[in-house]
Image (cartoon, grey):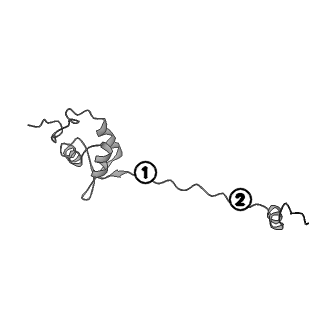
Amino acid sequence: MDPIPSRSAHTRAQEDEPSCDLVLPPPPQPLPQLLFSRDQAAQMLSIHVNTVDAAVREKRLRPARKGRRVLFHLEELDRFARLDIPGFHQNGPALRLGKKAS
């Protein structure tokens, strides 16, 4: 009986060749989003889009308008989220910011 070779000729040839380890650069990181739509802003702030619109009308939230588009900087959304607005988080009928429902 012939002994079973521990390594094939192909394997020995691969071991004798110098290795060519190619180092790839890391994949590019996605750019951070700079501006957010009304819908995105409402979702981020956990409020309704109508409340975002009311905040803009009452100048409590400053948009960055690009043509007809109403967009918001992340810093502006963060500033608005930190505001303490009386009556803002009440449940029930839709309230205008800072005003009680009659």
Could you say which is closer to the camera, residue 55 or residue 19?
Answer: 19
Residue 4, image x, y percentages: 86, 63
Residue 76, image x, y percentages: 31, 43
Residue drawn at the location 63% of the way across and 58% of the way down = 24
Spatial CA distance of label 1 from label 2 is 33 Å
Residue 77, image x, y percentages: 31, 43
Judge left or right: residue 85 versus residue 99: right
Residue drawn at the location 30% of the way across and 53% of the way down = 37
Residue 23, image x, y percentages: 66, 57
| Neighbour tally class for label 1: few under 14, some 14-19, many 20 plus, Cα within 10 Å | few
Quadrant in which the N terminus is drawn: bottom right
Residue that carries the numbered disc 1 in the rendered image: 32
Residue that carries the numbered disc 2 in the rendered image: 21
Q: Secondary structure under badge 2?
A: loop
Q: Is residue 76 visible?
A: no
Quadrant of the rendered image containing residue 62: top left
